[in-house]
Structure formats: C-alpha cells, structure tokens
Amino acid sequence: MATLQGDASNNSARKEQKAPSNLTQRIMTVIILGPLALLLVVAGGWVFAVGVIAVAAVGVTEFYLLAQDRPAQGSTLFGVLAVIAIGSAYQLEVGHWALPILALAVILTLIVKMLSHRDLKRAAGQALTTATGILYIGFPVGFLISVRMMPDGFVWVLLILALTWGSDIFAYIGGRLFGRHPLAPTISPKKTVEGAIVGYFGGAVPSLLLLQAASQLNPATLLISLFGPIIAILGDLLESWIKRKFGVKDSHVHGLNIFPGHGGVLDRVDALIAVTAFCYFALLLARPVTG
C-alpha cells in the first residue's frame, strides 16, 4: 500500500512539474509568434495573404491526417491546392471562384480515387472528406484575407484576433485557476464552465476597448464583440469534437511543430476559423454602419 501511495505521489509530482513547463512553452510561443502575426496584419496585401495561406495549408494537411489510414481519408494534394487557390482568389478579389474551385477539387478527388481502388462508395467518402476540409479551412482563409482588404480592414483583423486570442488565453488561465465544472465532458473533458466564463470576458473586453480606441464602436460592432467570444468557444469545441470522432488527441504533421506547447495548427486556429467566418458575414451585413 505504501508503495502504491508513493507511486501515486510521484506521478502527481511529475504532472505538477510538467504543467508549468508546458505553460512556459505556450507563453514563449505566443511571445515569439504573436508579433510575427501582427507584422503580417500590418503588412497586409500579398504578404498577409501568403502568410495566412501557408498556415492554412499546414492546417488542412493536419485535417486530412486525422483520418490517416482510414477509408474516408481525403486528398491532401487536392485539398491543399484548393486552399491555396481559394485564398489567392480572395486576394485577387475574385472570391466568386471559390465554389468552382471546391467543386473541381471534389471531382478530381472522386476520379483519382476511383481509378486508384475502383470503389465508388469509398471514393465518394474521400471526396466528401476533401470537401469538408476545404470548407472548414479554405473558405475562412479567404474570408480573413477579404476582411483585411475591407475599408478599415486592419482594425477588423485586429478585432478577430482580440476575440480569438483573448478568449483562448483567458479561458486557459481561468480553467487552470478556477476550473471545477466540466463544460462539455463528452467532447473536451479538460474545458470547464469557469474557464469559458473567464474566456468570454477575456475576449469581449479587449475587443470593446479596441473598437473604442479605433472609433468603431457602434451597435453592430458591439454585437460582434458580445457574440464573438461565444463563437470562439464553440469553434474550439467543434475542433475537439472532430478530433474525438477520429479518435485523435492532437492535430499535427509529424516533424512539423509550428506552435510548441500548443499542439498542431488546427489546435491553435480552431477558434480563429469560427470567429473569422462569423465576423466576415457580420461585417458584410453591417457594412453601411462600419463604413
């Protein structure tokens, strides 16, 4: 019994030692990559577009690897090419080409997979997975590029980042400090109600301050700030649900660790994907107000 208790104590001690190390790693990653992301936002144009598309290409690759060695694994080749093409289309202000690009990627996947194994049902599943990855990652990438090109696009992208980063960082801190009640135990056991509450205010308050400082606070942008953190939390849960469906703990490409301590690209941009789509359509609807 004493030995078991000793082993339990040692395991507990090891966990306590790992947690601060992981937290330190996460903080260092934010300190290093945060300014780089902001520099891309400041630069705008093709510099911003290329940076965003490059990250998205890794993200969509991670998405298809979630189903690695399974019958329904999508086409990484056509998925990545489609994401690059859609992002470029929005940068060239021909975003209406996004749907034809999606359709072409699906058709090519279906044809190539059919020629490969001559199983129509399996090929259809692979084409569907390919389409899902493009819709989930490729279109929000185009939306983010389009938002940067809007009037006051610099402010709107900062708003998206404030909603996303604020919610994510403060939810993590709130969960560690106050987390007691599981938020969605069947989807993501580590997320807590307390963390979500802290994360909500962590996203809403900075975004409101940003809008006030930029003289862009009005009823429409107020609603975006109030609903944005909720969308961020739901986006995080959606990616957790997808990983659970595939039985995968983290999304990553073997040997490519862009965000040390944070998991893969999808683990870091899950909330950003949802918030970007939300803000893109909200800003389009509010365009007469936001100028």
Image: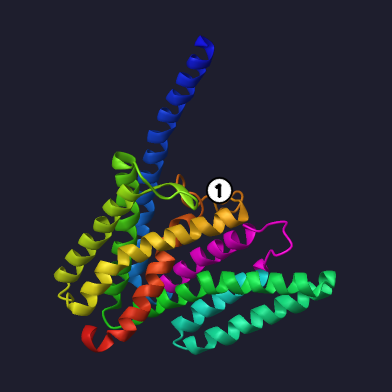
Percent from the top left, x then y, of residue 113?
Answer: 77, 72
- 78 displayed left or right of 276: right
| Label 1: element kind | loop
Q: Quadrant of the C terminus?
A: bottom left
Q: Which residues are magenta?
A: 47-76
User: Which residue is located at x 29 percent, y 74 percent?
Assistant: 156
User: Which residue is located at x 48 percent, y 55 percent?
Assistant: 267
Label 1: which residue? 249
Percent from the top left, x then y, of residue 217?
Answer: 17, 74
98, above or below 263, in the image: below
Percent from the top left, x then y, of residue 268?
Answer: 44, 56
**Prevalent SS, magenta region:** helix
Q: Is residue 174 magenta?
A: no
Q: Residues within 10 Å of mark 1 (few under 14, many from 20)?
A: few
- 9 displayed left or right of 75: left
Residue 269 shows up from this direction: no
227, above or below 169, in the image: below
Q: Quadrant of residue 151?
A: bottom left
User: Which residue is located at x 72 percent, y 58 percent?
Assistant: 70
Q: Relative to the observer, which residue lies in front, 288 or 7?
A: 7
